[in-house]
Image (spheres, rainbow, N blue to C red):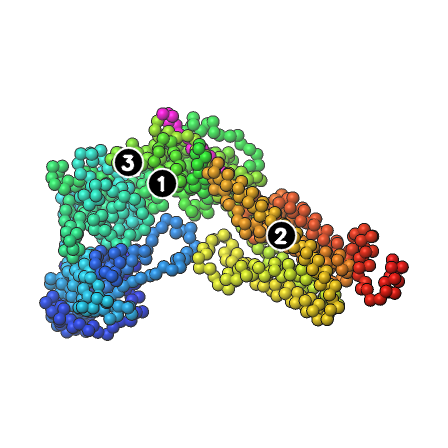
Amino acid sequence: MNPNSLRTRVFPINPFPFLSIFFFFSLAIPTSASTPYDQYCKDVVPASDPIASRSQPDSLLRFDTAYYTGGDPFLGPQDAASFRALSASETQTAGVFRIDGILTFLGPRFASINTGNWTRMINPHLPRGVSRSRVGFRLTGYWSQADGKLCMIGSGMRSSLASVNVGLKLNYPNSSNLESSLVTGTLECLDAGDDLTCFTMVSIMGFSLRNYEYKLVDGENENGRFVMYDGMENVSLGFGTGPAVCKAVRGAGIFELEYMEDCGSVNCDPLGGGSGGILPGFMSFNDIECTSEGRVRYLLDFANTSYNGYRLPFNPSTVLVAEGAWNGKKKHLDLVACRILNFKDTVAKASLGGCSIRLSLRSPSTMTLRSRSTVVGQMWSNKTMNDSGYLGRISFESPRNGNTRVEGLRYEYTEVGNLSKSCTGKITGKHKNVTYPNGYSSDMRFDMTVRNSKGQVAWGYSSPLSIGDRFYGYGVQSEFAVPVSDSQSGMLNISYVLSFNPHSDFQLGGEKRSIKYVEISAEGTYDAATGVLCMKGCRHVESRNRTFAKNESLDCEMFINIQYAPLNAKDRSNVKGTIESNRNKLDPLHFERIELFANSISILQADESIWRMDLEITMVLISNTLACIFLVLQLFHVKKNPDVLPFISVVMLTVLTLAHMIPLVLNFEALFVANRNRQNVFLGSGGWLEVNEVLVRVITMVAFLLQFRLLQQTWSTRVGGAGSWDRLWVSDKKVLYFSLPLYVGGGLLAWFVHLWKNSYNSRLLRLRQFGVQQLSFWGDFKSFAGLVLDGFLLPQIVFNAFCDSKERALAPAFYVGTTVVRLLPHAYDLYRAAHGSPWNFGGIYANPRMDYYSTAWDITISCGGLMFIVLIYLQQQFGGRCFLPKRFRESAVYEKVPVVASTELTTREVIS
């Protein structure tokens, strides 16, 4: 074999090469180390002059996700290490190469995360305050191809470590197999006696990626040792070739282990006792290497809980190191695994041994109700039962109902024929002019609330797995969403997945222990003409000791009935259903009826809501723009008639100014700076909603400036009157004395109502254990403030009455237009309640959190606003007290005239 030959390798979730390049080009790199190479490395690999014309590939030496110990106080105990050669060249000494490289230590919290909910996240942001702490060293040295010795010296790559001189010694063989593939060594601080910058010795253990030979698995295949799945080619699917093998296994997710019956009498711990006497329940396949020939190397990581993501670093006591080969003819993947030994004293002396474990994996060509894993396998030992190190047989399978689909996979309905009697009584008669969801549409999946017989609640998700002979997916509705005609209204075979996460005290049947997660596989029939879905379900019952067979861990005695709501329903009807156990009540797996209710909406309802949302956005912009226009018209009015300025109520202008200022103060950051902690939600309208928020705040600021200008002009005119307008100030004080108790009393009443509503909701929450949202006082206060703003003309009406003014201080366009802008949301709310969709995601126009909205409030506020318009008109035509009885108007005339002489007073009294 050519020692310089390279294999094609795939590292789909390895972040270290990119980090190494980042370190090399962006951080400060010292030109030389203060400690000579000969002093540290002469006895390992003597230095030699490089030959510039004989450079080697940068990937000559490297390892990823290595395990290490030591490094206090700079290196954390949960970090992982990687090494990458940045340049390599031959030297004057045959078989010796000069290497420049980077050794990096990276924390596990910065590893690539593989989350199943990634498709639901749009523009995710990392939380503030997370420190991306990395430690890197730039090293230079020599590697001997003959004995695999590598010795390098260098220093830190960050300012705090730039003065720290280090030496690295590794055993990196030129070629290796499974038993000799470990790369081990140490990293030392060379600044003797400097306790402030030095760290304790670091012991490193990684895996060689150079000239690897698959001797063990090839030998086992030649001897015909992998016969577990021979003869099952016709019921198995191929993983593909090359990197597709790794992709298929990695995409299958976390495998759940099933221990056979003989584990009660023989050893079934794949870690050889390293699990502490507790048999692990889950296993994951983490890639080391994938070749174009379908050969693979894995770290088999065992755990007692399923986790999501690529764990860094690995723990030597909970992993096996495996090599494997894809058998394309017999359609199974075969592996040989070894344990990591001798690592407890020092990682630098670790080795691989105990390579008696065998694994074989295949992908079934069909899914059924009882078997829904896309990849299954078995693990065993090549030793006999009486031999030391014997391992009992263990089966494992990928998560049921996973998202991975191997090409050629199909679903086989095995229980539909037994449902005819159970479903007959559930079918309702056909209704005219009623349309139910098409079986192939996305309306068949929904978020749900689950409630047991005790009223305990859990939240979950329900989605089809397959419909007919096709698997269901997020894009399936675009291909199959056609109108349901009479010829298409027959029964559809359908399979489902229902899952929910109950609270710790949620009880399901006789199980007293906490249930963390419930997943029900189901299959049955769906009638698009009646919207009835009838299915049989299976639930995986968690084992206490993990030593019983799979068939015994399934409870398939349950029936599920779901009634979909009509798409053209005018009420709030939605998906409802039940899950019932068919077992005897004395059976420990029996449970009382469970009810489920959909929390999500149909595509048609979503389209209507998005359309209404766009309409409300437009209405908000129009309303705010009109408010600015009416203010401009009022400013033109007072400019044309400056004598009327003092007769505008300062209290009214203050209320309007505060109404525009407070939202600006509360949302000042959102106006100019994007909130990083905010998650962007895709609503179907692109970024229009966010653009609207900015536009509304900009227009609100313009309205505030115009309103403040009107207030400033009124105030300046009165102050500049040199006492001639004192009686108007007195009238405004009376307005304040009248309005302030009214506003304070109304606020206190709103507070008491808030306390009463929260007390009622708290009792309801305790009784039903349901998620009743607690109302905030700030929300109720904003609603009351909206009511005050709806009646903004009240201070002006009271002011006109006190000073008996008939000046046309307010332009008709201002007081009529502004009132109409405030009343339009209430008119829209009345229309929305009568004709709109029951699914209102409003909060944009006629927002219930910004005013009082209900049929009674809408009518009351609208009538009040129209009445205020009429009163202002009458006051500006006939006087401020024109609507009061005559004797009140006469006393007002008497009080209006100042007393300057007794003769004038007498004359005035005679006239009256």
Q: Per the image, is 578 magenta?
A: yes
Q: Residue at x 46, y 44 (%)?
A: 442
Q: Secondary structure at mark 2?
A: helix
Q: Where is residue 685 shown, x and y percent of the image?
A: 51, 54
Q: Report the residue marked by disc 1.
A: 516
Query: Which quadrant, please, contains the N terminus?
Result: bottom left
Whichever of labels 2 and 3 marks the residue nearer the N terminus, that label is 3
**Element type at mark 3:** loop
Mark 2 or mark 3, which is nearer to you? Answer: 2
Q: Give whichever of discs 2 and 1 has the lower sequence position.
A: 1
Q: Quadrant of the C terminus?
A: bottom right
User: Identity of the amino acid at label 2?
Assistant: Val
Q: Position of residue 856 (x, y in %)?
A: 65, 44
Mark 2 vs mark 1, foreground winner is: 2
Q: Which residues are magenta?
A: 575-586
Q: Is residue 232 above or below residue 154?
A: above
- Residue at image location 79% in from the left, 52% down from the top: 884
* Total residue callouts: 3
Whether residue 747 is visible to the viewer of this picture, yes or no, is yes
Q: Is residue 802 left or right of residue 157?
A: right
Residue drawn at (32%, 33%) of the image: 554
Residue assigned mark 2? 744
Question: Label 3: which residue?
Answer: 544
**Mark 2 surroundings: few (<14), some (14-19) or many (≥20) residues within 10 A:** few
How far from the left and from the top, in percent, is residue 668? 52, 62
Q: Amino acid at mark 1?
A: Lys
